[in-house]
Amino acid sequence: MSYQKFTKDVGIIGLTKLIIGLKGLIILPVITKLLGAENYGIWAQLIITLGLIASLANLGLTYALVRFLPGQKDKKEIQDGIYSVLTVLFGISLIISLILIFFSGPISGFIGGERVLVQILALAVIFECLNPVFFSFFRASRQMKKWSCFMIFQTLGEAGLIAIAVLLGHGLFGAILSLLIVKVISFLIMGGLIIKEIGIKVPKFLKTKEYLFFGLPTILGFVAFWIIQSSDRYLIGFFLGTLSVGYYAPGYTLANAVIFFVGPLTFVMLPALSKLYEENKINKVKNYIKYCLKYVLMIGIPSVFGLSILSKQFLTIFSTPEIASHGYQVIPLIAVSLLLYTIYAIGVVIPVFFLKKKTKVDGTINIIAAFLNLGLNFVFIPKFGIIGAAITTLIAYTVMFMLSIGYGYLKYRELLPEIEWFFILKSIFASMLMSLFIIWLNPFGLSKTLIAVFWGVLIYGVLIYLSGGITKKEVLFFKNFFGLTGNDSGF
């Protein structure tokens, strides 16, 4: 595999992830400005509920497809893998959907919304479980253009229909119905294309046991990640009310900007490194991880500083002054948490837990961090409010990060990337000077904030280069890596 191929995939996924990120920024002002903070709190709880159920029902099977399908050559095995997973997930999601419809009354009372919202959500669960099977097929077979096109279609389709529905006065009912409609359309189109490519085959479930053995432990990771990232919305709603959820959730949404630019790397790395590892090209694997991690730090560190300094301005732009005045303080804590999680994902999860198939260990570490987060939330949220939820999130991610690093160094040190401490210090120093300049500008409003962001990026880039954070050799490497030269020396 060449740098250009990897880079091309990263570029495609990067653009797609950027658009996906914009979905939240489109929906955030539409709901908060037109329906208010309390309705946004209900919306946030509905969405995290959908994500939780889909992650549990998935059984880690789509994750297993990405791990095992890239090495498959036999078309019949690929067919059996796809259709066996699709069949299993359809059965599970259908049962869950019926249960949700039956208990829609109590559930709607808990989240503070109407019963019909939960009933529509129940139908959406089916397609939220099935569509990832098709996306995993495109991802595993390196058909990133198709993956990107359908992800963009689903993202913009949902954002557009939601905006139209709310603007036309259909409220949250129209918003959640829009999600269902787009997911159904995506399922039909992707399913048709995959049938055309690989045909139809009655599954024999030949690899299902192996997939489950690999995938089931990842549920611990999904549940733990959900507890850390999303359960605080439920507890905030329980202790402080839905309005406080509406104050907290927008800040969390904006803090996710930290991983906008690094998410594409992890997405492309999984199938790419699986193939290289199976071919015993360990040096290439280590090079991918080393330089991708440096890229993450180079982008992530200044992003955390910039978001922290401009947190109130961004929230005012994308939501309301009321939400900004209550929720801006959570952004720095959540931003640092997500950066730690991204470093952990690239530096440890991929080389150790994913390639070495140590998903049980990963799940155990995640569960420890998750229950620590959950327990602390019962203490911190009543005492400190929404800022308490952000503090416990940072504590949980820090514990997860430290435990995983410790395990990696004890067991598989040869696969872990070297930590460039001097680069990290230089990046922090450059970010601090950038932040001082932004504070001096004291921007207010969309145009002035964008100008401040532009100058911040420019100042950071110049400082990191002049300080030797990025050497000329590395500049040349990144030019080759990102396809900016005609040379492709490979790894």
Image (cartoon, rainbow, N blue to C red):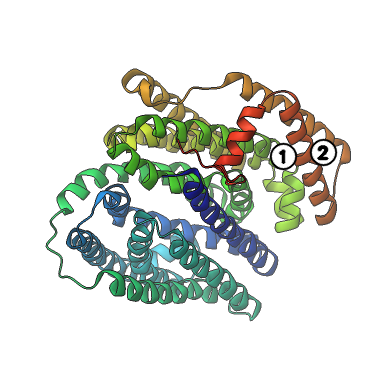
Q: What residue type is labelled 2?
A: Ile
* Circle 1 residue: 306
CB contact under 8 Å: marks 1 and 2: yes
Q: Distance between the residues labelled 1 and 2?
A: 8 Å
Which part of the image, by quadrant, shows the N terminus? top left
Question: Residue at image x 47%, y 47%?
Answer: 6
- Left or right of 107: which side holds 301? right
Dot 1 crowding, Cα within 10 Å, few <14, some 14–19, many 20+: many
Image coordinates for residue 170, horizontal then vertical, percent: 58, 79
Q: What residue type is labelled 1?
A: Gly
Number of marks in the image?
Answer: 2
* Local secondary structure at mark 2: helix
- Left or right of 336: which side holds 401? left
Whether residue 480 is visible here, answered yes or no, is yes
In this view of the protein, which residue sits in the foreground, 272 or 350? Answer: 272
- Left or right of 380: which side holds 25? right
Image coordinates for residue 249, horizontal then vertical, percent: 59, 52
* Circle 2 residue: 438
- Choose the circle earlier in sequence order: 1 or 2: 1
Image coordinates for residue 436, horizontal then vertical, percent: 82, 31
Whether residue 319 is visible here, answered yes or no, is no
In this view of the protein, which residue sits in the foreground, 105 or 327? Answer: 327
Question: Residue at image x 75%, y 56%?
Answer: 317
- Residue 225's label in the rendered image is none
* Local secondary structure at mark 1: helix
